[in-house]
Amino acid sequence: MSDARQTHLSPDPVHAVVGRAPDGGWQIALCTEQNPDAQPEHVADTELVARVRQIEAELAPRWTVRSLRSFAPRLLAAGVRPRRAHDLVLCHAILRDTAALNAPLTPSPLWMRTDEAESETGQPGLFDVDLGAPAPADQFDAVHAQWVAQLTALRTSADGRLRLLCAAESAGALVAEEMTAAGLPWSVDVHEGILHQQLGPRPMRGARPAHMARLATAIGDLLDDPTLNPDSPPRLLRALHRAGVFVESTSKWELSQIEHPVVEPLLEYKRLSRLFTANGWAWLDEWVRDGRFRPVYLTGGVVTGRWASVGGGALQIPRLLRQAVSADPGWTLVAADVAQLEPRVLAAMSRDTAMAEAARGRDLYEGVVRSGAVATREEAKYAVLGAMYGATTGESGRLVPRLRKVYPRAMGLVDAAARSGEQGGVVSTLLGRSSPRPDEGWRSEQSRASAPDAAGGDESRARSRARERGRFTRNFVVQGTAAEWALLWLAEIRHRLTALPTASAPAPESGPVFGSHAHLAFFLHDEVIVHAPRDQADAVAGVLRAAADAATRRLFPGFDIDIPLDVHIGADAAKHA
């Protein structure tokens, strides 16, 4: 790995600290960690893009801003792509909550994402999606002060892990804004063809599609209730009971256990209803424009560091619709995903060599079988997932104890995390993102249970809540560290794609930055899709694999663990069995 690739996530000598000026313009200070108080220059709002373009070309600094959500879109729309950044809001959340610092940052609503600030202030908002008037924290003095506070906090950390996490989180925020700007290539014609085949012609507003209407009639006839509305769970449940189908809910799982003629059409109706509601014609009208689906990604939107999204269900594209993800002419899609990422991460972070040996090759579960811990692949899957999610009953609960004998280091790590959670403690990922502390209600419940006059119900509730929290912290350390691996993977992919040549066939709908270069177009936990010129497909596949290897070495130095990729190249993103 070249020096540049070793350092692109590392601290840089220059930070361009950017904030609003009192007159509505901007102030930019070119600082270093050794000289953090450089005098800012004033830049008129109309000149911001040109000045950023110039500084980026000359210095490639780390752009230090309150939130990339409100800074990057304007630049990307103008063809300016910052190479590095430091998102103060995202890093504040990490440094405020981490248990890896003796003196974490003081919480402040000004530095919370708006969804967090709402819970503190009662004001509505959602994750800095509003790009309107600047908040007080957007002013240069506030931005600069917060940056200095974060630098001071990072200097007190025991090693470089928190610094790496902040760099990776900010790189992820850049990727998120870039994927929104470029969009995910989407064929309206293919999507509409799927809807027509599955649901029938597009219905009038407020009406059911033809295939759903036919099924609704059949369900009503089979339950002897011609006016039944299958979309009403209470009415449907009463009709099922009248017909002798005594289920407690209308869930797919419970209905599938019943033998009755109504089950098949009812399950099919529910499937079509989900498609119609979540990804039907209304979704297509709202979210796909000019051949692109452009959701808003929320970096660190889940407490473990996993991403979320605003609108369009970006992280829940149904398998049926993946063929609508369709490359532009002359371009292709290179998709890669990691099988069993979380158990592989558990093996590496616990440095369990026996579990790492089971992870050799494509299928960790088969490796668990070879170890002798369980007899079949299905048992291995139940056991490993049960270990990470805290299963204590059923097949998983029966099998988990076997893993403790074969993989003591891996199981010891998650068991210790669970005990800490049950006792009200905080656990942290490998790089230092910490779990939320228990709320006052949880602590009060535990206190009541230990009081001399506690009733049996108090003790039972407290034990149940403690076990629930233990299951959360058990999984937090694994899922959160897997999210860190994915952030490093994304950052490496982004960095390495920039070395590929300009495309001969443009993809103009991807915008001024990405219309001529291979770029990330989609990310979901352990999967990425790159939209690339067709003649660069093999090179991009190599980038994805090399980036995964680099992320693994960066997160788990000196430990040998396989984190293999399944890579597919095609005109669409359909997954084939």
Image: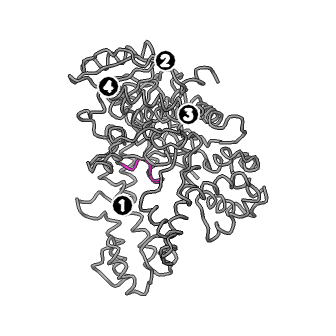
Q: Which residue is located at x 44 percent, y 51 percent?
A: 316
Q: Name the residue tied to disc 3.
A: 157
Q: Position of residue 233 (x, y in %)?
A: 35, 73
Q: How is the rendered protein coloured?
A: one colour
Residue nearer the viewer, 485 or 294:
485
In 3D space, how far apart are the residues under numbered discs 4 and 3 (Cα atoms)?
Answer: 25 Å
Q: Quadrant of residue 92?
A: top left
Residue 183 as seen in the image, left or right of residue 392: left
Q: Which residue is located at x 41 percent, y 32 percent?
A: 87
As drawn, the label of residue 34 is: 2
Amino acid residing under circle 2: Gln
Amino acid residing under circle 3: Ser
Q: How packed is label 1: few (under 14 Cα within 10 Å), some, or many (20 or more)? A: many
Residue 262 visible, this orientation: yes
Q: Name the residue tied to disc 4.
A: 141
In 3D space, how far apart are the residues under numbered discs 1 and 3 (Cα atoms)?
Answer: 57 Å
In the rendered image, the vertical position of residue 488 relative to residue 192, given as above or below: above
In front: label 1 or label 2: 2
Q: Name the residue tied to disc 1.
A: 199
Secondary structure category for the residue under label 2: loop
Amino acid residing under circle 4: Asp
Q: Earlier in the sequence, mark 1 or mark 3?
A: 3
- Magenta part of the protein: which range? 312-320
Q: Position of residue 38 (x, y in %)?
A: 39, 15
Q: How packed is label 2: few (under 14 Cα within 10 Å), some, or many (20 or more)? A: few
In front: label 1 or label 3: 3
Q: How packed is label 4: few (under 14 Cα within 10 Å), some, or many (20 or more)? A: some
Q: How packed is label 3: few (under 14 Cα within 10 Å), some, or many (20 or more)? A: some
